[in-house]
Image (cartoon, helix red, strand yellow):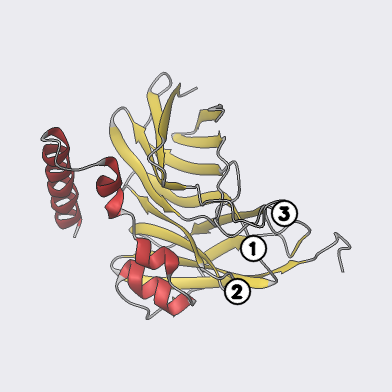
């Protein structure tokens, strides 16, 4: 598994490097590796299957999401995801009710601990979902974030 | 665009905690300019990488739903004090920047 990802990574990097050196690719094309379809997908299932190739998620109690229960400003919501699962290769953070649920996806190296903390935009009260890829399987956990407009904490 | 970085990599008990604050507007492309009624064009970071001594630690894809001036924190093993940690990003308009800090 590890060897395969390594091969794949080095091969594609090598190819991109060669192509860029030959002046074949514009910067725009190099960035085509960015999973556009996944980020533009509507609905959590579509986004996850587009990004990770499968939408069969197993709910896991070993994933912890730290998020404020009530966010007064939906534009800046602190989210920290960590997990006790082993062999984590990626962590993705989705906001269910956003027009485009996928916010970000973090591909972790083997030395990197399964921990990511960032800030996301949450359009309205929604559940924040973390999808963890561990040993080729997908696990998820969710947590509700309530967005109040007007800052009246209700 | 102001390219200011606030990055810290701190070693504690074998684990390095990296905290980074990047200055970027992260415009979604949905927000309207009230004066003209036109939408502000999308402008956001698409990919971000973290390298420790040249070896990849994190490779992230980001969408416009990451907050303006993105904050990121990760933890990784195997670094020693004085090692270099490089963060770089590129956005949807072809802009990019990188910053290197020393592990403390």
User: Considering depth in this image, is A104 or A4 the residue closer to the camera?
Assistant: A104
Of tags 2 and 3, which is closer to the observer?
A: 3
Counting from the top left corner in percent of width and height, residue A75 is at 67, 55
Residue at the far bottom: name it: A56
- Marks 2 and 1: same chain? yes
Element type where label 2 sits in the image: loop
Are the residues at dot 1 and dot 3 in contact (C-beta closer than 8 Å)? no
What is the x, y in percent for residue B100?
Answer: 42, 24
Residue B53 visible in the picture: yes
The residue that label 2 is drawn on is A97
Residue B1, picture quadrant: top right
Query: Local crowd at mark 1 within 10 Å, few (<14), some, or many (≥20)?
Result: many
Q: Which residue is at a point 54% across and 57% down the rendered structure image?
A: A81
Judged from this view, the residue extending furthest toward the front is B36
Left or right: A49 with respect to A130? left
- The chain holding disc 1 is A
Q: Please provide percent x and percent y for residue B74.
A: 48, 43
Q: Is residue B100 above or below residue A108?
A: above
Q: Which residue is mark 1?
A: A122
């Amino acid at each position: 598994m590890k060897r395969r990802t390594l091969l794949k990574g080095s091969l594609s990097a090598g190819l991109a490097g060669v192509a860029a050196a030959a002046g074949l690719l514009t910067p725009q094309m190099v960035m085509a590796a960015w999973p556009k379809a996944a980020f533009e997908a509507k609905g959590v299932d579509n986004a996850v299957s587009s990004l990770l190739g499968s939408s069969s998620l197993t709910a896991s109690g070993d994933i912890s999401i730290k998020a404020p229960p009530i966010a007064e400003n939906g534009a800046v919501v602190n989210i920290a995801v960590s997990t006790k699962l082993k062999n984590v290769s990626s962590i993705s953070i989705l906001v269910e009710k956003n027009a485009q649920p996928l916010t970000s996806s973090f591909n972790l190296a083997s030395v990197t601990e399964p921990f990511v903390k960032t800030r996301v935009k949450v359009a309205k009260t929604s559940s924040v979902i973390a999808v963890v890829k561990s040993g080729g399987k997908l696990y998820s956990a969710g947590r509700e974030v309530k967005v109040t407009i007007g800052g009246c904490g209700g | 665009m102001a390219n200011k970085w606030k990055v810290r990599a701190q070693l504690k008990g074998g684990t390095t905690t990296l905290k980074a604050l990047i200055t970027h507007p992260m415009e979604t492309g949905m927000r309207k300019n009230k004066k003209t009624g036109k939408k502000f064009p999308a402008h956001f970071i698409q990919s971000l990488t973290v390298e420790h001594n040249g070896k990849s630690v994190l490779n992230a894809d980001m969408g416009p739903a990451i907050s303006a001036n993105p904050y990121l924190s990760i933890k990784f093993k195997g670094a020693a004090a004085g090692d270099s940690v490089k963060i770089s990003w590129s956005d949807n308009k072809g802009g990019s920047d990188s910053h290197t800090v020393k592990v403390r």
